[in-house]
Image (tube, rainbow, N blue to C red):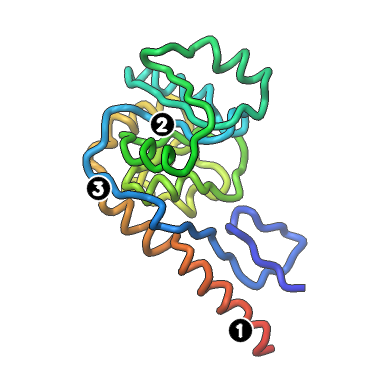
Amino acid sequence: MHYISISDADRSPKLDYLATIHHGINLEQFTFNPAPEEYLLFFGRIHTDKGAYEAIQIAKKSKKRLIIAGIIQDGIYFKEKVKPYLNEDDIIYLGSANPKQRDRLMGNAFALLHPINFSEPFGLSVVESFACGTPVIAFNKGSMPEIISDGKNGFLVSTIDEAVSAVKNMSRLDRSFCRKDAEQRFSSKRMVNDYIDAYRKILNK
């Protein structure tokens, strides 16, 4: 058996890995936007793992509008932690988003909020956001340190208050760097080449 992990954070100490290969995305589905609007975006399933409630608190304390997009995976969590804050003014829930809506929402966002409450093995929405030029504020867990270059394409934080401070510093980040980073590190072409290299290693044995 030859094991490949999608991140170093997702590795099991019981397995011997051939390589770590991060996911890649089709960059043609994402449009770079150098001039965003002022809203924050939460894009992911509505579940305690993903931190929709924390995203709401960050937006409230930052005095910025938050748009939430994603399927409701935990109905009780949504009812108790998300729904009470929803309105048509500053906390807006759009439901699930198709690829065109995702491109528009991510490209126009001032920043993507990713305050996860678990050791996420990877974060596709994070690299998708980069592809649109939008930096990410994420809780420093799981694979986030592998994906986010702190202070360059986003900020790694540990608390809601740290995230609020990061929002204030977000405008000094270069959105074009986010796009270039996605092109260099997270393209589907790079992922395919990495897997071909891994297969070659196996064949060469």
Mark 1 lies on residue: 200
Q: Residue 128, how many percent across, how many down?
A: 43, 48
Q: Please give the name of the residue rendered at 61% of the width and 70% of the height, measured from the top-left corner.
A: 19
Residue at coordinates 41% horizontally, 31% vertically from top-left?
41
Marks 2/3 in contact by CB < 8 Å: the verdict is: no
Calculate the distance from the C-alpha at mark 3 to the C-alpha at mark 1: 37 Å
23 vs 4, nearest the viewer: 23
Which of marks 3 and 2 precedes in the sequence? 2
Which circle marks residue 41 in the picture?
2
**Residue for badge 3:** 174
- Residue 50 drawn at (x, y percent): 57, 33
Q: Label for residue 1?
A: none
Q: N-terminal of the two: label 3 or label 1?
A: 3
| Viewer-nearest residue: 163 or 114 | 114
The answer for how far apart the CA atoms under marks 2 and 1 are is 41 Å
Viewer-nearest residue: 200 or 104: 104
Q: Image check: 174 left or right of 76? A: left
Disc 3 marks which amino acid?
A: Asp
Say what amino acid the circle numbered 2 marks: Leu
What amino acid type is highlighted by mark number 1?
Arg
Q: Quadrant of residue 36?
A: top left
